Image: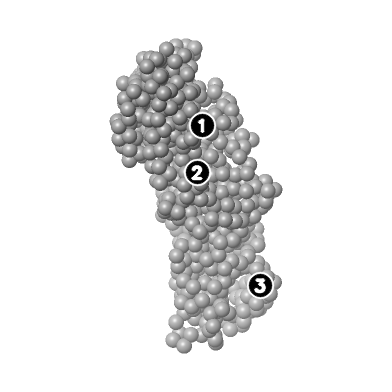
Amino acid sequence: MTKHAQHRFFAIIVACVLLAGSFVVSGCRADSALSCSVPPNPGETTRETLLRLRALSPAAKKGHITASGTTAWFVFDREELSPAISRNSSLDAIEVTLRSSVPVDVMLAPVFTGDLTKRGQLVARPAPRANALITGVSGTVTIRMRMILPDNSGNFTGFAVEALRSASSGGRGTELHDKTPYADITSVSLLRSETGWETRSDRYWAGFGREGGSRAYGGKGPVLIDRGEQAVFSFSASGEDIGTPLRPRRTAFSAGPVSFGWRFSPIPHSARVYAEQLEELPVHITPEMGTEHLDGLRVSASSLRDGVDSPIPLDPNAMITWPQSAWRNPERELFTWDRFPSILIFDTADYDVQSRYFKRLAFFVEKAGYTGQLMDDDAIAHLHGYNAHDYQAEGLAAFFDKAKRERFPLNRHEEELREILVDNGIIIAGDGGYLPGTGAVLSFSRESVSYLRYLFMAHEGFHGLYFTNTPFREEMHRLYTAMDRRAVDFLETYFTVVDSLGYDRSDRFLMENECMAYTLQQPLNRVSDYFSGIIRERFTRYGGPVELADYIEQSAAVDFVALGEDLETYVFTRWGLAGGRVGLWYSNRD
């Protein structure tokens, strides 16, 4: 907002004061037809409350702005405002929605107790202050501005809204001939502050801090982010306009020395960036390229403050490089896949910590000769678990249900895991035991070297999708049953002869799931070498039948290459994913 625009706004305010000088709060006590909605506190089940608004100008009585430059002045009942702020100190912004019938510039500004006389009248010359401006509004606009300091030390008491005929509209005069309002204020809310913008067809949202600012209606510009904040990006569906698995189309953003973005997705999604991922804060996040499907960029207080057991929504690729210095628990960090929030992902400090959470579970769910059994620590201490883990709701519920019914002593990490699963609806407590809910849990570790972390994330991530997506399972089953039986026998035998795996071959769900993940865990051009080289060599070393090993070597694992091609086509056209990659995120800091 330029100084000229600010002065113009407040010159108009003074004119309104002079025209409506007798329209006061005390004495007249005029209620506006509008009220201010206040959301319940987090965790409360009560409905929103409504705060009365007092009208200090004719435009504020019904929220109709009928003349260009008219200002609607509102103040709160102090006896209602103070308790509302005290109950939830995070409510520090006013949001106003306005619908215009002609192109207008809309301004929003705070009103303070110093703007009122002792009788509740507006003072003759309100002091200059920051305001928020949206230019060229044509349709519906929602504008939010932070106005309230902690404990209301700034003496906030109300707000003012002005609609000024846009210079670009070609209109003349101060009123429409048919007296149709220039703009109607349709709603007012007291909310948490949030900055940025969001555009949807004929409506636009913009948020501002206490310093105010300006945006053009429908504009997609830079947004400032600082410590303790997160940015949420909203993307519409890209449809078929996503490129190819080898050359996917991308968005690109800059934030000081950090550049980042996401590959296009055929379906709508939202993504997050946290201040912990950026440098030289505060810094502007600037859209640079491929933003035709970017519908919103909104910055707010970070959800990292919600507690160590509240999962951080994030893209899997970004989890791999998430700074360990930002972990809220020194033993592990907890994430949720931003596009598939029913999938939880643990990143642990080392394999030992990971085993405390998941080793007993691995034997119960997957290890041949142990499935369905709760093993004592001593019985499995000398046995290998896994370097990464994946479990669906059914197996998790069965494990914790059996432990409760048999009063089996779990360690504190398993008890912590159980509570996290319950809190996130993956298992459900009831009738003395546990039932499956919806979702899955995955885990990998910082002890794994970098390239293995990417491989494990791809492997476990595709397991997570397999657990939670029925059409994906059906497609894999169709492809698996059509494979050459020699290839199937080779892989299923491999899963049983390698003692560190020890998968239960009779579990058809497990066999198909693992075949899918082993195929998709690396880029398609590495599938042949992986199966005909690395897997075949281990297969032979552990005593697998020679004729099966020879078939895979001589065929260059053609069956797994064909499977990889079909699976990659499926996951790319559905979700924008590819072999070796379950995330859309990329950064120059990865």
Q: Which quadrant of the figure has residue 468?
A: top left
Circle 2 Cα neighbour tier, 10 Å, few/some/many (<14 / 14–19 / ≥20): few
- For badge 3, the amino acid type reads Gln
| Quarter residue 319 falls in | top right
Q: Amino acid at mark 1?
A: Leu
| Residue 347 seen from this side | no
| Gap in angstroms between the C-alphas marked 2 and 1 | 17 Å
Q: Residues within 10 Å of mark 1 (few under 14, many from 20)?
A: many
Of the pair 500 and 376, the residue shown nearer to us: 500
Tell me whether circle 2 and circle 1 mark residues in contact (CB < 8 Å): no
Whole-number angstrom distance, CA of label 2 to CA of label 3:
51 Å
Residue 380 in the image: x percent, y percent?
46, 14
The amino acid type found where label 2 is placed reads Leu
Residue 410, located in which quarter of the rendered image? top left
Q: Residue at x 57, y 31 (%)?
A: 451
Q: Label 3 neighbourhood size at 10 Å, few (<14), some (14-19), many (20+)?
A: some
Q: Nearer the viewer, residue 297 or 520?
A: 520
Residue 433: x and y, percent?
Answer: 34, 27
Spatial CA distance of label 1 from label 3 is 55 Å
Q: Which residue is mark 2?
A: 246
Camera-side residue of 561 and 95: 561
Q: Is residue 422 above or below residue 32?
A: above
Q: Earlier in the sequence, mark 2 or mark 3?
A: 3
Q: Residue at x 51, y 59 (%)?
A: 292
The residue wearing badge 3 is 6
